[in-house]
Amino acid sequence: MATAVLFGAAPALAADPVVLSKGHTDAVDVRYDGGSLSLKVKDDTVSPAVVRDPADVTFQVLPAAETVVPDLPAFAFLGAPGSKIWMLPQVQDPALLWPGWNTTTLDSGVFAGDKVGISLVGVDGPGDVTLFDTNSLGTPNIKFRSNDGLPDRLDVPVHTHAHAGWVFSATGTYTLRFQADATLADGTTLTTGPVGYRFVVGDLQAGGGDLSLGISGMNEGEYQPGDTVTLQAVQSPQGPLTKYRWFSRKPTEDEFTPIEGETGASYGFTATRALNGTQYVVKLYDGENVVATSTEVWLWVAFPPEGSSAAKSVTATINASDGALVISVDPGNRAVSLPAAVLSAAGDRWESTGALKPVTVTDTRAAQPGWTASGQVADGFRTEDGKTFAGGYLGWTPSITAQGGRQGVVAGPVAHPYGTVQPHTGLGGSAVLASAPNGKGLGTAELDAALKLSVPTDTAAGTYTGTLTLTAI
C-alpha cells in the first residue's frame, strides 16, 4: 500500500538580514531534509511566511517587555520579587515578539518514538535566560534555564507547535545556542550541532537602527611565530560608545574568557604556536550592558621550521651577539623505550604509556622575544622489516618540571593520539611542548611530558622505532 500526503506550498526561503520585534515566529523550527536535521526560523511576521537562517535574524525584545518578578513563591526561579526582567509572554501580546518552537514539518514514522530533542546548550550575554510555560492553574514549568547549568533538553513530539515565556534578566545582546538531536527509525543518530540565535533585549542602539560589531586586522592566512597581530573593533554604524572587552578561546577550552586589561578598541599581541587555532571576539558595552558582540575570528600560526633531524635533540642559535636559544637533552636520555603495549579496557586499542624524560631550554637573549618548543614524529614509526604506523598515534601531556621564578614558561596543550579523545592531533604534526610569551623566557627551563601510544588492534606485531624531533624557536 502506498500513501501520499499532500501539503500546501512550503514557505519561501529568505536570505536577507532582518530584525524581528513584533508578531509570531517559530524561532526554533526543526527541519529534516535530504537525510539532514537543521534548525531554521519560520517568520510569520510577513505574509506569506518565509523560512530564514538563524544567522540572518536578530530577535529584538522591545523595552515594552520590561516587567518585574511577581511576589509569588512559584516564580522565585526568576529572581527576587520586584526585580526587573524582560519577558516575551507565553500568550501573544501584539506589541511584542511571540517566538516558539515547531516540529510540524516532521513526518510520523521517521524518528524513533516520533520525537526529537531540542536543547539549549549555551548562552552568552549580560544576564540569565529562562524559558517556561504555565498550566491551566498558573503553575510554572521550566523548559530551559541558563543559570543552573546547561545543556537543558526538551523531548518534543513531531507535529508540535508550542510557545513559552522567554525571560531575560538584563538588557543587552545575547547569543542563545540551540541544538536539535534525533534518532531515525533505523537507529541512525542525527544532530544539528549548536546553532546560534541572536537576541537583543532593549533598544538596538541609541537613535534606532541595528548595530553590528566586527573585527578587522586578522590575516586570512598564517602568521609566523613572533609576528605582531593587531585587531581592531569596528562598529557599523559608528556610534558614541567606546567601552569594549576582548575575549579568547583556545582549541582546548570550552568557553570564551576575557583577556585581562584589554578594554580598548584595539588589541595587539605576538603570535606564537601556543595560540594556533585560538578564536577572538570583542564585545561593546553601554555601562555594564553588552550592546553588540562580534563574530569570532581565528588565528593561525605556521609550524616553526625544522631545526634538526636528530633524534630528540636540536640546537638553534639566534644572533649569537645578543645571546642564544638552545634546546637540548642529556645524552643518557636520548632513547625512550615504552613498555610492551596492552589491550585497552574497551578492547579496541593497543596502548602503552611512558615519560619523555627531561628536555632543557635555555634562553640567554637580552631582548626576551619569547619562545616555543615543539616536537614531531614526522616520519612515523617503523620496524626493521618495514612495518609502519603514523607518528600521530603517539600523543603527549606536556609539563614544566623546573623554571626560574619569573621565567613565565607554560606547558603546551595535550596532544591526544589519533583515534582517541578529540581533538586527536597526536605528534604526527608539530605539537607544542611549552612556550614563553614575549617579554619572558629568559633563563633555563626543564620540560617533560607523559607519553601515550594508542594504535588500532589490527596493527602488526613488532618493535617499532620513531624519531621525535624537538625544535625551539
Image: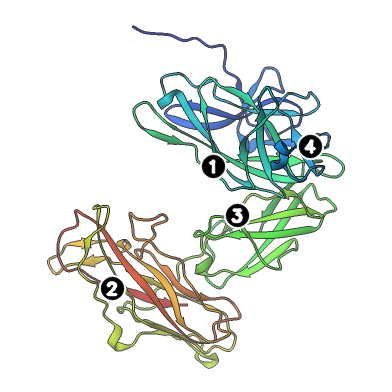
Q: Is residue 167 above or below residue 272?
A: above
Return the residue at label 1.
Answer: 194
Side of 110 where 118 appears, left or right: right
Choose the circle earlier in sequence order: 3 or 2: 3
Return the residue at label 4.
Answer: 70
Task: Label 1, secondary structure: give it.
Answer: loop
Residue toward you, 102 or 212:
102
Gap between marks 1 and 4 measured at Cα: 33 Å
Choose the circle earlier in sequence order: 1 or 3: 1
Position of residue 119 measured from the top left corner of the image (x, y, whole percent): 54, 38
Q: Residue furthest right?
A: 207
The part of the image, by quadrant, that contains residue 208 is top right
Which quadrant of the figure contains the N terminus? top left
Q: Amino acid under label 1? A: Pro
Gap between marks 4 and 2 measured at Cα: 68 Å
Instruction: Identify the residue at image location x=66%, y=33%.
Output: 132
Side of 430 where 438 appears, left or right: right
Cβ atoms under marks 3 and 4 closer than 8 Å: no
